[in-house]
Image (cartoon, rainbow, N blue to C red):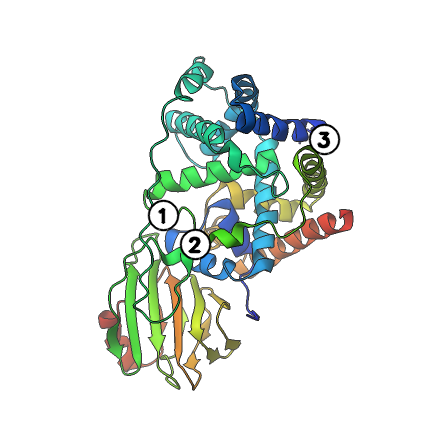
Amino acid sequence: MRPQPLTDEAAFAALIRRIADHSDRAAFATLFAHFAPRLKSYMRRLGAADGLAEDLAQETMLAVWRKASLFDPARAGAATWVFTIARNLRIDALRRERPTEALPPEAERPEIETAPGAEAELITAERDRTLRVALAVLPPEQAQLVQLAFYEDKPHREIERVLGIPLGTVKSRLRMAMQRLRAALEEKS
Amino acid sequence: MSISHHPSEATLLAYAAGGLDEGSSVVLAAHLGVCPDCRQAVRVCEAVGGQMLATLQGTGMATDALTRALARLDTPVPPEKVPAAAPTSLGFPLPHALSPYPLGNWRWIAPGIRHILVLPRRAGRSGLHLLRIAPGIALPGHGHAGNEFACILTGSYTDETGRYRPGDLAEMDTGDEHMPVADTGEGCICLIATDAKLRFRGLLPRLLQPVIGF
């Protein structure tokens, strides 16, 4: 893993804000250069052929442009927000029909007092950096399962079969992994 | 609403990663809609997804990819499909997650048990069901050959693992067995996603199974 400076993370959030406030095409181009190739990798790892992966990366970036005003830096960092858009587009591509907004609008309200704009961007970027460090030091057998959850798209039963790890072990390792990550975040806040 | 049964971390992670099928996602969303703790947990899982994306090695895009993207920025946004409002005729508030699905009427499947099929089970895709169990009625004891998620919408039931009240999520895996009994009082309505046939212990329930469609 190549750690990114904290300022980069906050800078991406600021670019999304520039799109929302000023329809800033240069900001979009910078985000595109950074995220589109990663989105393509993400789609390919989940089994999309090259052409479809490219299309889904394109669609995700287009959604970033259109939805920029919905980005709330207090709720999620730039990478997280882009990830959720990509995830939803991929699910849509697979299912065609799906509850796109599964949660009631009131569930989407931030539950914490939020600082506006740049300050929120820095706080969230700091949290994301903490998370990244915590991910990097997860025990390998836990890190592997977290990776699989995002990139293999296999039900846990399938993991049990492919890796030869009993389902109960899969679940307890993931529980320990998430507890570690949450503990790291709580320690920081 | 006090919630005492939650999905496993593995399930929350799968939900956040987009790895749950449609029916299971709807049941999870019904729980998340009323459980701030699990919403927060999903948010952490999504942040993990964000960090995974941020640290991925990129794959080269087509040479004209940015030009094409920029050219599309000004095309008008297609209008969002507004899902039909959830029917209220069922006599209880339906979770928001069910609103895109047209629901039929309750169908009798066994004494004290009624059922609405929301999504049929297909290969690799969970069936989604609403189940209404009259007060004091026991579902036939059954085992699970796959994953099952159930979210209680009204009333409550009790099985070997405890009492399940509105908002609680029951997660059953392959091999788990239980015999839920609707508590006396108002009975119980739950939303259930299951990706394999249930394995009933008794002969009569097994005979009824083709009728039930579970």
Q: In the orientation shown, which residue stands out farthest toward the left?
A: B211
**Which residue position holds label 3?**
A6
Q: Measured from the top left, where is residue B126 in percent x and y?
A: 35, 57
SS category of the residue bearing label 2: helix
From the viewer's side, name the closer residue of A125 and A44: A125
Q: Measured from the top left, where is residue B142 in percent x and y?
A: 39, 75
The residue positioned 34% from the left and 61% from the top of the image is: B128
Circle 3 packing at 10 Å, graded few (<14), some (14-19), many (20+), is some
From the viewer's side, name the closer residue of B3 and B169: B3
Q: Amino acid at mark 1?
A: Arg
SS category of the residue bearing label 1: loop
Q: Are marks 2 and 1 in contact (CB under 8 Å)?
A: yes
Question: Quadrant of residue B184 in the image?
Answer: bottom left
Label 3 marks a residue whose chain is: A
Determine which of the numbered discs, if any, sits on residue B25 in the image. Answer: 2
**Which residue position holds label 1?**
A98
Q: Is residue A127 above or below residue B137?
A: above
Q: Are marks 3 and 1 in contact (CB under 8 Å)?
A: no
Q: Amino acid at mark 2?
A: Ser
Q: Is residue B95 left or right of residue A109?
A: left
